[in-house]
Image: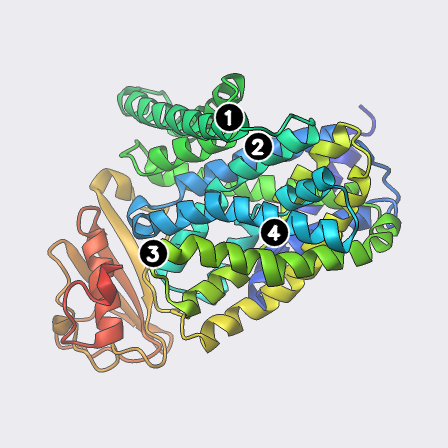
Amino acid sequence: MEQLPLILGTGGAVLLVAVIAVRVSIRVGLPSLLLYLGMGVLLGEAGFGIQYDNPGLTQSLGLAALVMILSEGGLTTRWTAVKPSLGIGIALSTVAVAVSVAVTGAALHWLLGLDWRMALLWGAVLASTDAAAVFSVLRSAGVGKRLVGALEIESGINDAPAYIAVVVLAEGTTIDWSLPLLVVYELAAGLMIGLAFGWGGAFALRRAALPATGLYPLATVAVCVVAYSSGQLAHASGLLATYVAALVLGNSKLPHRSDTLSFAEGLGWLAQIGLFVLLGLFASPSRIFESLVQGLVAGAVVLLLARPLSVVLSALPFKIPWREQVFLSWAGLRGAVPIVLALIPLSSGLPGAQELVDAVFVLVIVLTLLQGATLTPLAKVLGLARHDEAHEIDVDSAPLDEMGAELLQVRINSGSKMHGVYLAELRLPVGATISLLVRDGTGFTPNKNTRLQERDQLLVVTTSDARDAAERRLRAVDRAGRLARWKGESGQ
């Protein structure tokens, strides 16, 4: 008890520094996970001397944090935004994982001399992208919604097949004709469990008369956690059940939906911060440097061979333009998920697992620095950057969920065809209107004769039913001007 004030004070200070680090990371265009990992290393044996070396506990806490991160990701994902990218997203999270495991395993078997099971285990660990890493960079990249939707679906779903592959290879399960059936069962059962808890939870929450507003966010997150537990107990994919349940709940008409999304977002950030600091604390800088060559070799294989090939094969049925395929290949950021997956064989005492964990740390740091720093410039070079997309903002001062209304914020960037368009020419759908225009730091209420200019910022108020049509119209005018058709940019 005497150390409790010190522990709480240290935890609070770390959390405050981590919150400030978010703003720094967004400015420099790098995922904040690097700063969190650095904070953990600083607190560990190489810095303040805190000794921590418990792979089993780290794995358990890491999986718990992943459940929270997936819950937040599903709850804050809009189905209408990712629906056009559903096919390519699912292909990236299943076919691409299988291709990546095979290609990475074969290459590392040849380059590093690993036996086949360990080489494929490396491939399985490195097959999963990380939602937290991907989207902290995509905020500044500003790419179109089809690419964002595909990457969002991929990062939310591909943890499940990668986790199954790691467990199978780490436990030494016999690989025969029944293995694909097992994988299909676990994914299908996880999907059904997630749908059941999502629909059932939404139904119950709409009819519950809870005594306090703050209980609704707690109950919503609890449904996602129970979905994970039920999936695992049914020998299905608990991670997939979590994400699907959260996705259904987040797109249902829940009581106090805005409060729930804000709570989930805060909980997701807390899970990310705690997870990355813990992983940094667990890391040993001396061992990491010894694994530098292996990590760089594995990173080169994943970045230059396995990821591009898996994207090309996954995109074949969908006729994805080559520019978008290049971006999807480069945007496959690795973060906490591969590190947590690498702890599974380490906890099982598998020979060579420590080298895998250390190499993954190296790979995550190097690839995050390389990809994170170049993703935004790459989007601009490929002509995919769209900083003037409409996006939802959080407002706590008005019960918009009770009014059935939503707010969108739009920035008109240089080169936008909105420049010079009169407000009346936007022809927004019934139920949507521009309530505020900010120009050169001054805000005013526009009228139908107001002419839009570059660098204007618009606040759009829309009913929930008209939201999607309003977004489509704004994107259409942005790309084609006042004469744009309603569907614009293929309606995406």
Secondary-structure class at tag 4:
helix
Pick whichever of labels 1 and 3 is earlier in the sequence.
1
Q: CA distance from mark 1 to mark 3?
A: 27 Å
Q: CA distance from mark 4 to mark 2?
A: 18 Å
Answer left or right for 327 relative to 485.
right
Would you say the residues marked 1 and 2 are in contact, meaning their CB atoms lie under 8 Å apart?
A: yes
Going by the numbered disc 1, the residue's amino acid type is: Leu
Q: Position of residue 221 (x, y in %)?
A: 45, 29
Going by the numbered disc 3, the residue's amino acid type is: Phe
The residue furthest front is 177
Answer left or right for 446 relative to 352.
left
The residue at which mark 4 appears reads as: 103
Q: Which labelled disc corresponds to residue 276?
A: none
Q: Which labelled disc corresponds to residue 164?
A: 2
Going by the numbered disc 2, the residue's amino acid type is: Ile
Secondary-structure class at tag 1:
helix
Q: CA distance from mark 4 to mark 3?
A: 22 Å
- Residue 344, above or below 29: above
